[in-house]
Image (cartoon, grey):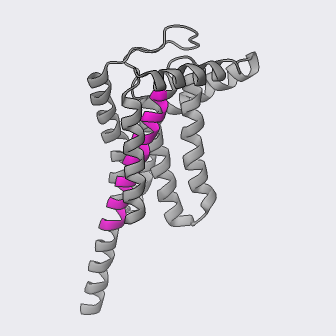
């Protein structure tokens, strides 16, 4: 539990740091990181990034989540299915609340995509991290392969960077969304282990009684 508390604390501190995106330090970081990422643009990479950025699109995430939940329910994995649904539904709702609280406008120039709504924190980074990372955690529970967790972390990271490359987010939007997405996944993981442990204990008690 201590490691989860530590990770949560780090994530929340990172988020609080980027909340002050108007400060000189964060603004300088945004300008330098954004300039570096945009300088990498070329035709081939732009085509790849433009396609890849849709991995975090709300419709794609919703479709993947629905298929995942249906599959889990078919195998009677009720807790996993409910928490997987929460990884998108609750994180998406929280993201809307945070965006309307901070009301940060998106970058104006160098856009490859047209996006509406506010910029901070990035919804693709926040919801994508919560969903893909928690999905990887659930898969890891079954297959016990470390590379599953690595993919679950790397996929939303590159997805997030692609949003800066596309010109629709500042780097601080991404890192803030990434931080909250990880924190949300940690909370779901702790909840899963707690409830799953109690369920196993109850089942063992029943078997002993029988």
Q: Does the magenta stretch include residue 179?
A: yes
Q: Residue 84: horizontal and vertical position, in percent?
A: 39, 50
- Viewed as shown, does residue 185 lie left or right of 54? left
Q: Residue at x 26, y 86 (%)?
A: 205
Q: Residue at x 64, y 18 (%)?
A: 38
Which is more toward the observer, 137 or 72? Answer: 137
- Viewed as shown, does residue 206 lie left or right of 188? left
Q: Residue at x 41, y 24 (%)?
A: 21
Q: Visible in this render: residue 70? A: yes
The region drawn magenta spans: 172-194
Q: In which quarter of the image is the C terminus?
A: bottom left
Of all residues shown, which one is farthest toward the front? 24
Q: Visible in this render: residue 62? A: no
The correct choice, above or below, for 145 with respect to 40 in the image is: below
The correct choice, above or below, for 62 with respect to 6 in the image is: above
Q: Main secondary structure of the magenta part?
A: helix
Q: Quadrant of residue 20?
A: top left
């Amino acid at each position: 539990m201590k490691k989860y508390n530590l990770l949560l604390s780090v994530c929340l501190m990172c988020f609080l740091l980027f909340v002050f995106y108007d400060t000189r330090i964060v603004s300088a970081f945004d300008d330098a990181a954004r300039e570096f990422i945009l300088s990498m643009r070329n035709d081939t990479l732009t085509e790849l990034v433009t396609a890849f950025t849709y991995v975090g699109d709300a419709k794609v995430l919703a479709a993947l989540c629905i298929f995942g939940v249906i599959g889990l329910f078919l195998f009677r994995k009720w807790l996993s299915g409910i928490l997987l649904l929460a990884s998108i539904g609750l994180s998406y709702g929280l993201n809307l609340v945070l965006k309307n609280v901070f009301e940060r406008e998106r970058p104006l120039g160098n856009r490859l995509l047209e996006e509406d709504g506010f910029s901070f924190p990035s919804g693709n980074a926040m919801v994508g991290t919560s969903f893909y990372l928690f999905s990887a955690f659930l898969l890891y529970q079954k297959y016990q392969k470390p590379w599953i967790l690595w993919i679950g972390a790397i996929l939303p990271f590159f997805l997030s960077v692609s949003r800066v490359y596309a010109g629709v987010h500042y780097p601080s939007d991404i890192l803030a969304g990434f931080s909250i997405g990880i924190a949300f996944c940690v909370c779901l993981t702790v909840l899963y282990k707690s409830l799953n442990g109690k369920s196993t204990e109850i089942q063992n008690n029943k078997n002993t009684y029988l």
